[in-house]
Amino acid sequence: MPVNYDEELNGRLQTLDARATSDFVHRDELKLHPDKRLVTEVYPHPIRKNTFAGKPHYFEGLTYRFLANKPEMHGVDVLDDGTPVITMTSSMRHRDFADRSRFDSLLFTGDRSGEAWDQPARRTPFVYCTPMVVPALGPDTIIARGVYQLEKDKPLTYSPEDSECVFAYCRSDDRGATWGDIIPQPDLGHDRSIEADLCHQPLIEGTKLTFGFATKQQPPHEDDYPSGRLGSQSLLRTWHADTNTWDEPVFLPADWCTSECSVVRAKNGDLVVALRHKDPRSPSPNDGWRNIVTSYSSDEGATWAEPQAFFLFGRVHANITALPDGRLIMTHAARIGELDKRIYGGVEAVVSDDNGRTWDWDGRYILFRCPQANKLFNPRTVRLQDGRMMTAICNYTNYTWSDLNEEDVDEWMSWRGLPFANYLGLGNVHVVIWDLQD
Protein backbone atom coordinates (compact mmCIF):
# COMPACT_ATOMS: atom_id res chain seq x y z
CA MET A 1 0.00 0.00 0.00
CA PRO A 2 1.53 3.37 -0.98
CA VAL A 3 2.21 6.03 1.64
CA ASN A 4 -0.53 8.61 1.85
CA TYR A 5 1.26 11.94 1.56
CA ASP A 6 -0.91 14.73 2.94
CA GLU A 7 0.05 17.63 0.71
CA GLU A 8 -1.98 20.19 2.64
CA LEU A 9 -0.68 19.20 6.08
CA ASN A 10 2.96 18.88 5.05
CA GLY A 11 2.75 22.14 3.15
CA ARG A 12 1.89 23.86 6.41
CA LEU A 13 4.50 22.06 8.50
CA GLN A 14 7.47 22.13 6.14
CA THR A 15 8.07 25.15 3.92
CA LEU A 16 11.80 24.67 3.26
CA ASP A 17 12.74 23.70 -0.27
CA ALA A 18 14.37 20.27 -0.07
CA ARG A 19 16.96 20.84 -2.82
CA ALA A 20 18.08 24.24 -1.52
CA THR A 21 18.24 22.85 2.01
CA SER A 22 20.41 19.91 0.95
CA ASP A 23 22.87 22.28 -0.71
CA PHE A 24 23.26 24.21 2.53
CA VAL A 25 22.97 21.75 5.40
CA HIS A 26 25.05 18.70 4.46
CA ARG A 27 27.52 18.16 1.64
CA ASP A 28 28.70 14.55 2.03
CA GLU A 29 27.77 11.12 3.33
CA LEU A 30 29.27 11.90 6.76
CA LYS A 31 26.77 14.75 7.18
CA LEU A 32 29.54 17.29 7.60
CA HIS A 33 29.33 21.02 7.05
CA PRO A 34 31.28 22.40 4.11
CA ASP A 35 34.86 22.82 5.32
CA LYS A 36 34.91 26.54 4.48
CA ARG A 37 31.72 27.43 6.30
CA LEU A 38 32.15 30.21 8.86
CA VAL A 39 29.02 29.81 10.98
CA THR A 40 26.43 27.16 11.72
CA GLU A 41 22.86 27.49 10.54
CA VAL A 42 21.08 30.54 11.95
CA TYR A 43 18.33 28.89 13.92
CA PRO A 44 15.46 29.87 16.26
CA HIS A 45 16.48 30.27 19.88
CA PRO A 46 14.14 30.52 22.90
CA ILE A 47 14.66 33.54 25.16
CA ARG A 48 13.06 34.00 28.55
CA LYS A 49 11.94 37.29 30.06
CA ASN A 50 11.33 37.03 33.77
CA THR A 51 8.54 38.74 35.68
CA PHE A 52 8.18 39.71 39.32
CA ALA A 53 5.05 37.59 39.70
CA GLY A 54 3.45 35.00 37.48
CA LYS A 55 4.92 32.96 34.68
CA PRO A 56 7.91 34.18 32.66
CA HIS A 57 7.41 35.19 29.05
CA TYR A 58 9.20 33.23 26.30
CA PHE A 59 9.85 34.39 22.76
CA GLU A 60 12.03 33.41 19.82
CA GLY A 61 15.36 34.95 18.99
CA LEU A 62 18.06 33.67 16.64
CA THR A 63 21.43 32.13 17.33
CA TYR A 64 24.46 30.61 15.62
CA ARG A 65 28.04 29.65 16.43
CA PHE A 66 31.28 30.51 14.66
CA LEU A 67 33.11 27.49 13.24
CA ALA A 68 36.65 28.83 13.30
CA ASN A 69 39.07 26.54 15.09
CA LYS A 70 38.93 27.16 18.84
CA PRO A 71 37.73 30.78 18.67
CA GLU A 72 37.85 32.88 21.83
CA MET A 73 38.29 36.39 23.25
CA HIS A 74 35.89 38.18 20.94
CA GLY A 75 35.04 41.86 20.54
CA VAL A 76 32.20 43.49 18.64
CA ASP A 77 31.06 46.89 17.37
CA VAL A 78 28.88 48.37 14.58
CA LEU A 79 29.99 50.77 11.86
CA ASP A 80 27.99 53.92 11.16
CA ASP A 81 26.30 52.35 8.12
CA GLY A 82 25.03 49.45 10.25
CA THR A 83 27.74 46.93 9.32
CA PRO A 84 28.63 44.79 12.36
CA VAL A 85 32.30 44.04 13.08
CA ILE A 86 33.48 41.12 15.18
CA THR A 87 36.98 40.03 16.19
CA MET A 88 38.18 36.81 17.78
CA THR A 89 41.41 34.93 18.38
CA SER A 90 41.70 31.51 16.77
CA SER A 91 44.23 28.76 16.12
CA MET A 92 43.90 28.79 12.35
CA ARG A 93 47.26 27.35 11.23
CA HIS A 94 48.48 25.02 14.01
CA ARG A 95 47.43 23.01 17.05
CA ASP A 96 49.85 24.35 19.66
CA PHE A 97 47.18 25.73 21.94
CA ALA A 98 49.61 26.81 24.66
CA ASP A 99 51.34 29.47 22.58
CA ARG A 100 49.06 32.39 21.71
CA SER A 101 51.82 34.05 19.70
CA ARG A 102 50.97 31.65 16.88
CA PHE A 103 47.24 32.36 17.01
CA ASP A 104 45.50 34.56 14.46
CA SER A 105 43.37 37.52 15.42
CA LEU A 106 40.45 37.51 12.99
CA LEU A 107 38.22 40.42 11.97
CA PHE A 108 34.95 39.89 10.12
CA THR A 109 32.48 42.42 8.77
CA GLY A 110 28.93 41.23 8.37
CA ASP A 111 25.55 41.73 6.85
CA ARG A 112 23.52 44.46 8.57
CA SER A 113 21.11 41.77 9.78
CA GLY A 114 23.89 40.23 11.89
CA GLU A 115 23.03 36.85 10.39
CA ALA A 116 25.88 36.47 7.85
CA TRP A 117 29.58 37.36 7.76
CA ASP A 118 32.05 38.10 4.99
CA GLN A 119 34.92 35.74 4.22
CA PRO A 120 37.85 35.42 4.23
CA ALA A 121 38.68 37.01 7.55
CA ARG A 122 40.96 40.00 7.80
CA ARG A 123 43.66 39.98 10.46
CA THR A 124 44.37 42.46 13.25
CA PRO A 125 47.81 43.03 14.78
CA PHE A 126 46.75 41.79 18.23
CA VAL A 127 45.25 38.87 20.05
CA TYR A 128 42.65 39.61 22.72
CA CYS A 129 41.33 42.29 20.40
CA THR A 130 38.56 44.87 20.71
CA PRO A 131 37.35 46.57 17.49
CA MET A 132 36.41 50.19 18.17
CA VAL A 133 34.47 52.11 15.53
CA VAL A 134 35.33 55.84 15.55
CA PRO A 135 33.08 57.64 13.01
CA ALA A 136 34.69 61.02 13.77
CA LEU A 137 37.87 59.72 12.14
CA GLY A 138 36.08 58.40 9.05
CA PRO A 139 33.22 56.07 8.07
CA ASP A 140 35.55 53.10 7.60
CA THR A 141 37.85 53.70 10.59
CA ILE A 142 38.33 50.91 13.13
CA ILE A 143 40.81 51.09 15.98
CA ALA A 144 41.96 47.77 17.38
CA ARG A 145 43.01 47.45 21.02
CA GLY A 146 44.68 44.27 22.18
CA VAL A 147 47.69 42.53 23.67
CA TYR A 148 50.87 43.13 21.69
CA GLN A 149 53.88 40.85 21.96
CA LEU A 150 57.15 42.73 22.24
CA GLU A 151 59.39 39.76 21.41
CA LYS A 152 57.95 37.54 18.71
CA ASP A 153 60.04 34.47 19.46
CA LYS A 154 58.60 33.88 22.93
CA PRO A 155 55.33 32.20 23.93
CA LEU A 156 52.49 34.64 24.54
CA THR A 157 49.98 34.73 27.35
CA TYR A 158 47.08 37.17 27.38
CA SER A 159 48.14 39.16 30.39
CA PRO A 160 50.21 42.34 30.14
CA GLU A 161 51.56 41.28 33.54
CA ASP A 162 53.79 39.14 31.33
CA SER A 163 56.78 41.42 30.76
CA GLU A 164 56.80 40.53 27.07
CA CYS A 165 53.29 41.91 26.48
CA VAL A 166 51.70 45.35 26.46
CA PHE A 167 48.28 46.72 25.64
CA ALA A 168 48.47 48.59 22.35
CA TYR A 169 46.36 50.25 19.65
CA CYS A 170 46.37 50.25 15.88
CA ARG A 171 44.22 52.13 13.36
CA SER A 172 42.67 50.99 10.10
CA ASP A 173 40.89 53.37 7.73
CA ASP A 174 39.66 50.63 5.39
CA ARG A 175 37.66 48.35 7.70
CA GLY A 176 40.62 46.22 8.69
CA ALA A 177 42.21 45.59 5.29
CA THR A 178 45.40 47.42 6.31
CA TRP A 179 46.71 48.73 9.62
CA GLY A 180 48.89 51.61 10.72
CA ASP A 181 51.58 51.85 13.37
CA ILE A 182 51.42 50.07 16.73
CA ILE A 183 50.72 52.55 19.56
CA PRO A 184 51.57 51.16 23.03
CA GLN A 185 49.35 52.18 25.94
CA PRO A 186 51.30 54.11 28.60
CA ASP A 187 51.52 52.81 32.15
CA LEU A 188 49.86 54.59 35.03
CA GLY A 189 53.21 55.24 36.71
CA HIS A 190 54.16 54.58 40.32
CA ASP A 191 54.58 50.88 39.51
CA ARG A 192 50.88 50.52 38.76
CA SER A 193 49.92 48.55 35.68
CA ILE A 194 46.60 48.23 33.90
CA GLU A 195 44.68 45.03 34.52
CA ALA A 196 41.97 44.24 31.98
CA ASP A 197 41.16 40.71 30.87
CA LEU A 198 38.08 41.55 28.81
CA CYS A 199 37.36 43.04 25.41
CA HIS A 200 35.12 45.82 26.73
CA GLN A 201 34.02 48.56 24.38
CA PRO A 202 35.05 52.05 25.55
CA LEU A 203 32.81 55.10 25.66
CA ILE A 204 33.42 56.76 22.27
CA GLU A 205 32.60 60.46 21.97
CA GLY A 206 34.04 62.03 18.84
CA THR A 207 37.74 61.18 18.92
CA LYS A 208 37.72 60.66 22.72
CA LEU A 209 37.76 57.03 23.87
CA THR A 210 37.16 56.57 27.62
CA PHE A 211 38.13 53.15 28.93
CA GLY A 212 37.21 51.39 32.14
CA PHE A 213 40.28 49.73 33.61
CA ALA A 214 41.48 48.31 36.90
CA THR A 215 44.77 48.33 38.74
CA LYS A 216 46.11 46.87 41.96
CA GLN A 217 45.42 48.68 45.20
CA GLN A 218 48.25 50.93 46.35
CA PRO A 219 49.29 50.12 48.98
CA PRO A 220 48.17 46.48 48.73
CA HIS A 221 44.77 46.03 50.30
CA GLU A 222 45.58 43.06 52.53
CA ASP A 223 46.69 45.29 55.41
CA ASP A 224 44.01 47.96 54.96
CA TYR A 225 40.77 46.20 54.05
CA PRO A 226 38.80 43.28 55.47
CA SER A 227 39.88 39.91 54.17
CA GLY A 228 37.90 38.47 51.32
CA ARG A 229 37.69 41.64 49.23
CA LEU A 230 39.33 42.30 45.88
CA GLY A 231 42.76 43.93 46.00
CA SER A 232 42.04 46.14 43.02
CA GLN A 233 40.76 49.60 42.15
CA SER A 234 38.72 50.66 39.11
CA LEU A 235 39.57 53.71 37.03
CA LEU A 236 38.60 55.59 33.89
CA ARG A 237 41.12 56.91 31.42
CA THR A 238 40.50 58.86 28.23
CA TRP A 239 42.56 58.54 25.06
CA HIS A 240 42.40 61.19 22.33
CA ALA A 241 42.77 59.05 19.22
CA ASP A 242 43.38 62.01 16.88
CA THR A 243 46.41 63.29 18.85
CA ASN A 244 47.48 60.07 20.61
CA THR A 245 47.38 61.76 24.01
CA TRP A 246 46.00 60.48 27.31
CA ASP A 247 44.20 62.37 30.05
CA GLU A 248 45.09 61.75 33.67
CA PRO A 249 43.29 58.71 35.07
CA VAL A 250 40.10 59.17 37.09
CA PHE A 251 40.18 56.69 39.97
CA LEU A 252 36.99 55.36 41.48
CA PRO A 253 36.97 55.11 45.30
CA ALA A 254 39.62 52.66 46.49
CA ASP A 255 37.46 51.31 49.30
CA TRP A 256 34.99 49.91 46.77
CA CYS A 257 37.59 47.23 45.97
CA THR A 258 36.31 46.74 42.42
CA SER A 259 38.07 45.59 39.27
CA GLU A 260 36.87 45.27 35.64
CA CYS A 261 34.82 48.25 34.49
CA SER A 262 32.33 49.11 31.75
CA VAL A 263 31.41 52.78 31.22
CA VAL A 264 28.73 54.57 29.16
CA ARG A 265 27.21 58.04 28.91
CA ALA A 266 23.57 58.16 30.01
CA LYS A 267 21.09 60.33 28.18
CA ASN A 268 21.05 62.84 31.09
CA GLY A 269 24.82 63.29 30.78
CA ASP A 270 25.88 61.08 33.68
CA LEU A 271 28.70 58.57 33.48
CA VAL A 272 27.37 55.12 34.42
CA VAL A 273 29.69 52.24 35.35
CA ALA A 274 29.29 48.52 35.98
CA LEU A 275 32.05 46.94 38.06
CA ARG A 276 33.19 43.54 39.24
CA HIS A 277 33.10 43.19 43.01
CA LYS A 278 33.42 40.48 45.64
CA ASP A 279 31.28 40.30 48.73
CA PRO A 280 33.45 39.04 51.62
CA ARG A 281 30.52 36.95 52.91
CA SER A 282 30.69 34.67 49.86
CA PRO A 283 33.03 31.73 49.33
CA SER A 284 35.45 32.24 46.48
CA PRO A 285 36.95 29.05 45.10
CA ASN A 286 37.22 30.83 41.74
CA ASP A 287 36.40 34.18 40.16
CA GLY A 288 32.93 33.03 39.13
CA TRP A 289 31.85 33.87 42.69
CA ARG A 290 32.04 37.62 42.12
CA ASN A 291 29.10 40.01 41.86
CA ILE A 292 28.18 43.24 40.05
CA VAL A 293 27.91 46.79 41.37
CA THR A 294 26.86 49.91 39.48
CA SER A 295 27.25 53.61 40.15
CA TYR A 296 26.93 56.94 38.35
CA SER A 297 28.64 60.31 38.36
CA SER A 298 27.13 63.67 37.41
CA ASP A 299 30.47 65.52 37.47
CA GLU A 300 32.70 63.54 35.10
CA GLY A 301 33.94 61.19 37.79
CA ALA A 302 34.87 63.67 40.51
CA THR A 303 32.24 62.15 42.81
CA TRP A 304 30.16 59.00 42.58
CA ALA A 305 26.82 57.79 43.89
CA GLU A 306 26.87 55.04 46.48
CA PRO A 307 27.49 51.79 44.59
CA GLN A 308 24.54 49.42 44.30
CA ALA A 309 25.28 45.68 44.55
CA PHE A 310 23.28 43.09 42.64
CA PHE A 311 23.27 39.42 43.68
CA LEU A 312 25.56 38.17 46.42
CA PHE A 313 27.60 36.01 44.03
CA GLY A 314 27.80 34.39 40.63
CA ARG A 315 27.54 37.33 38.18
CA VAL A 316 30.54 38.69 36.28
CA HIS A 317 31.67 40.51 33.12
CA ALA A 318 28.95 43.16 33.14
CA ASN A 319 28.95 45.34 30.04
CA ILE A 320 26.62 48.32 29.47
CA THR A 321 25.23 49.45 26.10
CA ALA A 322 23.45 52.80 25.66
CA LEU A 323 20.50 52.83 23.24
CA PRO A 324 19.40 55.86 21.19
CA ASP A 325 16.14 56.13 23.19
CA GLY A 326 18.08 56.52 26.45
CA ARG A 327 17.63 53.02 27.85
CA LEU A 328 20.72 51.20 29.10
CA ILE A 329 21.22 47.45 28.65
CA MET A 330 23.60 45.64 30.98
CA THR A 331 24.64 42.21 29.73
CA HIS A 332 26.52 39.86 32.04
CA ALA A 333 27.56 36.25 32.57
CA ALA A 334 25.59 34.29 35.17
CA ARG A 335 28.27 31.79 36.08
CA ILE A 336 26.28 30.68 39.11
CA GLY A 337 22.78 31.72 38.14
CA GLU A 338 19.40 30.67 39.45
CA LEU A 339 16.18 29.91 37.60
CA ASP A 340 13.13 28.52 39.37
CA LYS A 341 15.30 27.64 42.38
CA ARG A 342 17.73 25.61 40.26
CA ILE A 343 21.35 26.41 39.48
CA TYR A 344 21.97 27.31 35.87
CA GLY A 345 24.66 29.06 33.87
CA GLY A 346 24.16 31.48 31.05
CA VAL A 347 24.03 35.07 29.87
CA GLU A 348 21.48 37.62 31.09
CA ALA A 349 20.52 41.17 30.16
CA VAL A 350 18.82 43.78 32.32
CA VAL A 351 17.42 47.20 31.34
CA SER A 352 17.51 50.60 33.04
CA ASP A 353 15.16 53.34 31.86
CA ASP A 354 16.25 55.95 34.43
CA ASN A 355 19.90 56.59 33.49
CA GLY A 356 21.31 53.72 35.53
CA ARG A 357 19.67 54.67 38.84
CA THR A 358 17.71 51.42 38.94
CA TRP A 359 17.63 48.23 36.91
CA ASP A 360 14.71 45.93 36.13
CA TRP A 361 16.19 42.78 37.63
CA ASP A 362 12.80 41.13 38.05
CA GLY A 363 12.25 41.51 34.31
CA ARG A 364 15.70 40.46 33.17
CA TYR A 365 16.26 38.47 29.97
CA ILE A 366 17.79 34.99 29.90
CA LEU A 367 19.59 35.07 26.55
CA PHE A 368 21.77 31.97 26.60
CA ARG A 369 22.30 28.83 28.66
CA CYS A 370 25.20 26.43 28.79
CA PRO A 371 26.83 23.86 31.05
CA GLN A 372 30.22 24.65 32.60
CA ALA A 373 29.19 28.27 32.97
CA ASN A 374 32.34 29.09 34.96
CA LYS A 375 33.91 29.38 31.50
CA LEU A 376 31.55 32.06 30.18
CA PHE A 377 33.38 35.19 29.01
CA ASN A 378 32.69 38.76 27.95
CA PRO A 379 29.05 38.85 26.77
CA ARG A 380 28.75 42.04 24.75
CA THR A 381 25.57 43.54 23.26
CA VAL A 382 25.32 45.98 20.33
CA ARG A 383 22.29 47.39 18.57
CA LEU A 384 21.78 46.39 14.94
CA GLN A 385 20.51 48.81 12.31
CA ASP A 386 17.00 47.33 12.40
CA GLY A 387 16.74 47.86 16.18
CA ARG A 388 17.37 44.28 17.26
CA MET A 389 20.08 43.45 19.80
CA MET A 390 23.07 41.28 18.92
CA THR A 391 24.87 39.68 21.85
CA ALA A 392 28.23 37.97 21.28
CA ILE A 393 29.33 35.37 23.84
CA CYS A 394 32.43 33.26 24.41
CA ASN A 395 32.40 30.05 26.40
CA TYR A 396 34.80 27.17 26.80
CA THR A 397 33.93 23.51 26.99
CA ASN A 398 36.07 21.25 29.19
CA TYR A 399 36.27 17.47 29.23
CA THR A 400 38.00 16.62 32.48
CA TRP A 401 36.72 13.20 33.55
CA SER A 402 39.04 10.46 32.24
CA ASP A 403 41.52 7.72 33.15
CA LEU A 404 44.52 9.70 31.94
CA ASN A 405 47.64 9.88 34.04
CA GLU A 406 49.93 12.88 34.21
CA GLU A 407 52.35 11.46 31.65
CA ASP A 408 49.48 11.06 29.17
CA VAL A 409 48.51 14.71 29.15
CA ASP A 410 49.96 17.30 26.81
CA GLU A 411 51.91 20.17 28.30
CA TRP A 412 49.41 22.80 27.16
CA MET A 413 46.74 21.31 29.39
CA SER A 414 48.92 21.79 32.46
CA TRP A 415 49.38 25.40 31.42
CA ARG A 416 45.60 25.80 31.43
CA GLY A 417 45.51 24.83 35.08
CA LEU A 418 44.16 21.27 35.19
CA PRO A 419 47.11 18.89 34.75
CA PHE A 420 44.97 15.77 34.37
CA ALA A 421 42.34 17.17 32.02
CA ASN A 422 41.25 14.97 29.15
CA TYR A 423 40.56 18.02 27.01
CA LEU A 424 40.43 21.56 28.29
CA GLY A 425 39.54 24.89 26.83
CA LEU A 426 37.63 24.18 23.60
CA GLY A 427 36.56 27.72 22.72
CA ASN A 428 33.24 28.71 21.19
CA VAL A 429 31.97 32.12 20.07
CA HIS A 430 28.17 32.38 19.84
CA VAL A 431 25.83 35.12 18.68
CA VAL A 432 22.27 35.66 19.94
CA ILE A 433 19.96 38.10 18.12
CA TRP A 434 16.95 39.26 20.12
CA ASP A 435 14.40 42.03 20.72
CA LEU A 436 13.48 44.08 23.75
CA GLN A 437 9.95 43.12 24.81
CA ASP A 438 7.98 46.25 25.69
Image (spheres, rainbow, N blue to C red):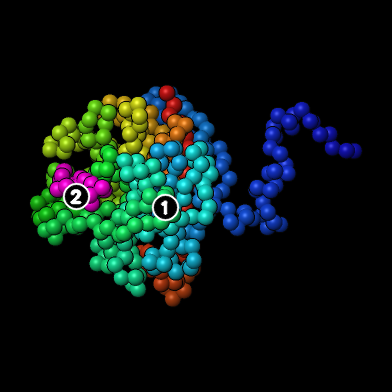
Which residue is rendered at x = 33% and y = 28% of the image? 327
The three-letter amino acid code for the residue at tag 2 is: Trp
302 within the magenta span: no
**Quadrant of the drawing holding the N terminus:** top right
Q: Which residues are magenta?
A: 233-252
The three-letter amino acid code for the residue at tag 1 is: Gly
- Asked if residue 263 is positioned above or below residue 34 in the image, the reply reads above
Q: Secondary structure at mark 1?
A: loop
Position of residue 17 measured from the top left corner of the image (x, y, whole percent)? 71, 39
Instruction: Indicate left or right for 8 with 175 as reference.
Output: right
Position of residue 139 measured from the top left corner of the image (x, y, whole percent)? 39, 42
- Disc ID at residue 123: none
Residue wearing tag 1 = 176
Position of residue 402 measured from the top left corner of the image (x, y, whole percent)? 49, 65
Instruction: Indicate left or right for 151 with 72 as reference.
Output: left
Residue wearing tag 2 = 246
Task: Find residue 294 and report its image quarter.
Answer: top left
Position of residue 245 measured from the top left corner of the image (x, y, whole percent)? 20, 50
Q: Secondary structure at mark 2?
A: strand
- Asked if residue 217 is positioned above or below residue 13 in the image, the reply reads below
Point out the residue furthest to the right here: 1
242 within the magenta span: yes
Which residue is rendered at x = 51% and y = 51% of the image? 66
Which residue is rendered at x = 32% and y = 55% of the image? 170
